[in-house]
Image: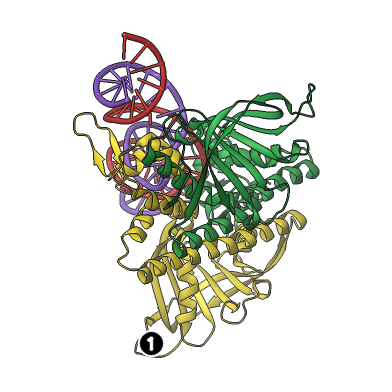
Chain colours: A green, B yellow, C red, D purple
Amino acid sequence: MVQALTIGDFSRMTHLSVKTLRYYHRVGLLEPADVNAATGYRYYTVGQLQTALAIRRYRDLGMPVDDVRSVLAAPDPASRDALLAVHLDRLQAQLAETEAAVASLRDLLTRPSITIDVEHRRVEAVAALAMTKTVDSQSLGPWWRAAQLELPAGTVGGLFDDELFTQERGDAVLFVRSDAAEPAGRATPFVVPAGELAVAVHQGSHQDADRTYAALGSYILERGLGAPGPVREYYLVGLRETADQARWRTEICWPIDISRKADTGRLEL
Amino acid sequence: MVQALTIGDFSRMTHLSVKTLRYYHRVGLLEPADVNAATGYRYYTVGQLQTALAIRRYRDLGMPVDDVRSVLAAPDPASRDALLAVHLDRLQAQLAETEAAVASLRDLLTRPSITIDVEHRRVEAVAALAMTKTVDSQSLGPWWRAAQLELPAGTVGGLFDDELFTQERGDAVLFVRSDAAEPAGRATPFVVPAGELAVAVHQGSHQDADRTYAALGSYILERGLGAPGPVREYYLVGLRETADQARWRTEICWPIDISRKADTGRLEL
DNA sequence: TTGCTCCTCACGTCACGTGAGGTGGC
DNA sequence: TTGCTCCTCACGTCACGTGAGGTGGC
């Protein structure tokens, strides 16, 4: 015999609030077993308790409602576990980012000013193998990591459109110098454009790179050297060399109009 | 000489998007040094870069904007660090909850059904020292932990209004049996009401208690024993005895109408 | 002068919570 | 019959993002 549970009963038993249960109904995550057509009353069954408890646990893990729906709809435990693993990886990555953010904050508080040495450099156009993507800044990080590991051997460089920072969406290119005429994996032939650049070396995690960007930007602003175009990064020591981000060394290159002034310099910020 | 940075320049240097900078202006988190009255153009200074970078780091830690404002307004490093420590504690607690949620999910998936033994029990009114609060379910957890540690020696029990679960807000009481006529700390004299209860023992973390609640509720539903009133918990082995939540034992007590039937039983859910 | 940058609304997102105002069920 | 439970809107929250439509600055 199937007992009908009112929304209140079901709430008390699952510790999901009545509002939450109505929301889950509305978005199709947990449909009541029966809805009275005349009154609109929702009725649940004892069999739905397990589903509700599972939903609670997935949500406690911060899994988005759409993903919970997918997990519940998984045809077998193996595919369910695969979806779950993806989310657990995401949690792990978040944790790592939070730890890096704590370190980054500590660094800013204990060492409020940094000094950068700026070099002016003219680079010629060179042939390369590159991966290109229009990304939003949210997904830049994962793409950046994956793409670096996919590129053939060599020093990796990157080009990043202004819009990536100002509009949270823009073009990014990661490349490795190469004369290859054929694609290698997903990397395709590409010509890295020539340019005049102000270059500063950033030491440490990429999460702290904004400090060097700010300092370099100030340097260029003070001298009125600003020029349009994407910024450029060269990973002298990076993800491919070591997992220890403290040892990373990145050249950060800002486009300048070298015709105005050509001295190099130093800036404390 | 103070250089004026447009919002675009400032965005490129801080890696905060233009939309975000406008938002921070609107909510008073980061006011431009100057706003042109005629055009509405925002202008920032190099000196504001440090503040912007700090805001980015606080936000990367998931600190709410209001809290970031407080941290920035802190009169000295010590009070700033105190505010920061509160947030880091919150992060730590979140991490622990996520870990518990993972364990709880694993438990549900590997051991989908549980069996509970239900005892019917009549309890008489007893004198106690109690802490009482109207809480929302969000803040129930922290209050519950703190209150338990504050109560005098004895077995702690709790009373929880239905509304806490169904409406996400309601009255909670934690008590310890005592004949004291005077308050002890923040605990005040209280009479725990008499009641007729269906009782099941929940073993393990409180995060899993909903499974026992669901099973006990099903048991009561099947027998038509339901009665109004708050649910009750007794912490036989709990926070005060051990930090190892796997060893916790909690009696979960649901009010019943004992006049209808008086048998005890067992239920698998 | 062109087009690039900047502006202000108004609305959307996510996962619900908060009333208001009303009806049904025991 | 009472009052408790349940219902449906419509709007709010948080920290922004997304257009639309328009003006100013170099």
Q: Quadrant of the C terminus of chain B?
A: bottom right
Chain that bears disc 1: B
Residue occupying image coordinates x 35% and y 44%: B24
In this rendering, the answer to whether B77 lies above or below A133 is below
Q: Is residue B229 visible?
A: no
Query: How far across and how far down the image is residue A72, in percent?
Result: 68, 41
Is residue A31 shown left or right of residue B73? right
Label 1, secondary structure: give it.
loop
Q: Nearer the viewer, residue C8 or B228?
A: C8
Query: How far across and how far down the image is residue B75, in percent?
Result: 30, 66
Q: Quadrant of the N terminus of chain B?
A: top left
Query: How far across and how far down the image is residue B90, in percent?
Result: 49, 63
Query: How far across and how far down the image is residue B94, in percent?
Result: 55, 61
In this rendering, the answer to whether C25 lies above or below B110 is above
Q: Nearer the viewer, residue A265 or B108?
A: A265
Residue occupying image coordinates x 48% and y 30%: A163
Q: Toward which corner of the image does residue B193 lie, by quadrant?
A: bottom left
**Which amino acid does the dot numbered 1 rest on?**
Ala
Residue occupying image coordinates x 57% and y 64%: B260
In this rendering, the answer to whether A229 lies above or below B11 is above
Residue occupying image coordinates x 45% and y 68%: B85
Residue farthest toward the left in the current orientation of the protein: B37
Q: Toward which corner of the image does residue A138 lie, by quadrant?
A: top right
Question: Which residue was labeled with disc 1?
Answer: B184
Q: Is residue A65 visible?
A: yes
Q: Toward which corner of the image does residue B34 lie, by quadrant?
A: top left
